[in-house]
Image (spheres, rainbow, N blue to C red):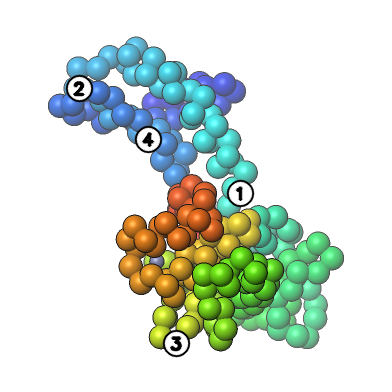
């Protein structure tokens, strides 16, 4: 992989040469650039092409750098990072207490991921219910909020789902890691499904009237999940 200095950063890049006229630049989730360009492009021209996009690249990479990977040492709770601490307590619940993400040392190692997901599940469900309660006035003009059940689950392929008949909204526990506005966007998306089942024009019209920045939030969420690999 080649490297280029942009600002104070060494940014790796690869060049894919093809029979195309224009050059394209993608910032990969792994933090390198992928340039697709004409077969005969020179290294100098590539260099210039990247530099023309310098502002965008640095802005994007900077915003990603704030997205620290989840680790054994750090846990994110709605976008804030907390130190992970093993604590000698008998109860087998994960808790956020006194600025620490506490994992009981009594918990067997193989049960830790499950306990963490249980923590996020409750966190996400509680916050989603609170959001619905806080916005009841605005939401109830469009939605019947009565008898909606909020459930959570660690899902691999989607952020939420809506069983319209049973009126169950299921939210991915992964949403407990990021700023709560992402959870809000997904919650409203699923809520709109109670009115519109597909993802057509009517669906987006309604969704965007409640969450105007939905598309951007969704893109950011996709990217964060990919980058972090949670
Ligand atoms: Zn949907």
Residue plotted at (50% across, 56% down): 209
The residue tagged with tag 2: helix, strand or loop?
loop
Quadrant assignment for ligand 1: bottom left
User: Considering the numbered disc 1 on the image, is that residue within a helix, a strand or a loop?
Assistant: loop
**Residue at x 65%, y 69% (from the top left corner):** 137
Disc 4 is placed on an element classified as strand
Q: What whole-number distance in Å separates the C-alpha atoms at marks 1 and 4? A: 21 Å
Q: Which mark is residue 26?
A: 4
**Label 3 to label 4: alpha-carbon separation:** 42 Å
- Disc 2 residue crowd, few under 14, some 14–19, many 20+, Cα 10 Å: few
Circles 1 and 4, Cβ within 8 Å, touching? The answer is no
Label 3, label 1: how far apart the Cα atoms are:
38 Å
Cβ atoms at labels 3 and 4 below 8 Å apart? no
Task: Give me the residue at 54% from left, 58% from top.
Answer: 210
Disc number lying in front (1 or 4): 4
Farthest top residue?
44
Measuring from the top left, give residue 10's x and y in whole percent.
52, 26
The image shows a total of numbered marks equal to 4
């Amino acid at each position: 992989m080649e490297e280029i200095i942009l600002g104070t950063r060494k940014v790796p890049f690869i060049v894919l040469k093809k029979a195309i006229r224009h050059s394209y630049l993608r910032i990969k989730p792994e933090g390198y650039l992928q340039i697709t360009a004409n077969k005969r492009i020179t290294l100098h021209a590539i260099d210039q092409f990247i530099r023309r996009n310098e502002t965008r690249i640095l802005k994007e990479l900077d915003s990603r750098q704030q997205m620290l990977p989840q680790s054994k040492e750090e846990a994110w709770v709605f976008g804030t990072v907390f130190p992970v601490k093993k604590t000698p307590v008998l109860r087998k619940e994960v808790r956020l207490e006194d600025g620490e993400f506490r994992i009981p040392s009594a918990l067997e190692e193989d049960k830790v991921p499950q306990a963490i997901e249980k923590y996020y599940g409750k966190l996400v469900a509680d916050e989603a219910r609170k959001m619905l309660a806080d916005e009841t006035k605005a939401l109830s003009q469009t939605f019947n909020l009565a008898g909606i059940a909020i459930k959570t689950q660690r899902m691999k392929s989607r952020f939420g789902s809506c069983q319209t008949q049973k009126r169950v909204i299921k939210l991915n526990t992964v949403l407990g890691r990021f700023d709560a506005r992402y959870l809000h966007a997904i919650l409203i998306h699923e809520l709109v499904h109670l009115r519109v089942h597909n993802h057509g024009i009517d669906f987006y019209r309604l969704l965007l009237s409640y969450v105007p920045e939905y598309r951007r939030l969704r893109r950011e969420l996709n990217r964060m999940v990919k980058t972090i690999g949670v």
